[in-house]
Amino acid sequence: GMTPEAQNLLPDLICVNLRNLRISILSSLRPQDGAGMTSLRPARWAGITCLFVLFVVVPAFADSFPPRAAKKYLKQTVREARYRNLPPENVAGQIHQESGWDSAAKSPYAEGLSQFTPDTVSFVKTVWPREFGEGDALSPGWAVRAMCRYDRWLLDRVNQSYVEALRAYNGGLGWIQKECSGGLVCAPSLETCRRFRSAASCAENLDYPRRILEVWAPRYKEFLNPFNAGAGQDARAPRGDS
């Protein structure tokens, strides 16, 4: 597969190629030798059609945010995030990063909106049986509630550092605790991470919170602002219990 660095560059490469293609099409549409529009050949009419797609259709799809699937779950996501004293935009960004809001998403090791592994599902059901005993990762409502509960649990174990909590969600709390033991500075760094894991694992794990907190969360915060301003307080008291 592609390296994280290549994946990060992909959107920029696509934009550059689209821009170059647009320029090429515009150049091909310029009438030659003083000819007017009536002299356009069929190939140039095809160019006009392609130009319409590039300027109108592609941007319409590219600027569609959040994904249509997200709108089914955003209200619950905001409610559950508030209940656990979590920034709703962070949780929304995390779901976006994990599954793209596809409740049926499956990978070799995880599934659902939250992309919980079987071990994480078992952990959540065992530690909080009254809340999560019924349901599973492929149940959207359960997945959103369980993600928020698990995020809060992780935050309470990494001194409320959202970066470290997300890294723990992505790679396991045990790795983060190893990095923070033995007198090591508990701060996200490739050097510290590579003491315990491979370079590829560290690169992915360090990029995970960056994507959520710097790329997706700001976009969801902007989108959720009107909703947050008009939403009432949840009936359940917010809490940060362990």
Image (spheres, rainbow, N blue to C red):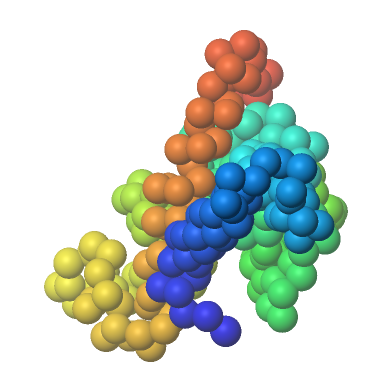
Residue at x 71%, y 30% (from the top left corner): 75
Residue in front for this viewpoint, 183 or 223: 223
Residue in front for this viewpoint, 72 or 120: 72
Residue 108 picture location, percent across and down = 72, 80
Residue 121 picture location, percent across and down = 71, 65
Query: Position of 150 compared to 187: left or right?
Result: right
Give above or below for 111 relative to 211. Answer: below
Residue at x 35%, y 85% (from the top left corner): 199
Residue at x 62%, y 20% (from the top left corner): 227
Residue 119 picture location, percent across and down = 66, 73
Give above or below for 15 relative to 53. Answer: below
Residue at x 76%, y 43% (from the top left corner): 38
Query: Position of 77 compared to 186: left or right?
Result: right
Whether residue 38 is visible, yes or no, is yes
Give above or below for 141 relative to 102. Answer: above
Residue in front for this viewpoint, 211 or 23: 23
Residue 180 picture location, percent across and down = 26, 69
Query: Position of 50 compared to 172: left or right?
Result: right
Figure quadrant of the N terminus: bottom right
The image quarter in which residue 184 lies: bottom left
* Count of numbered circles on the image: 0
Whether residue 154 is visible, yes or no, is no
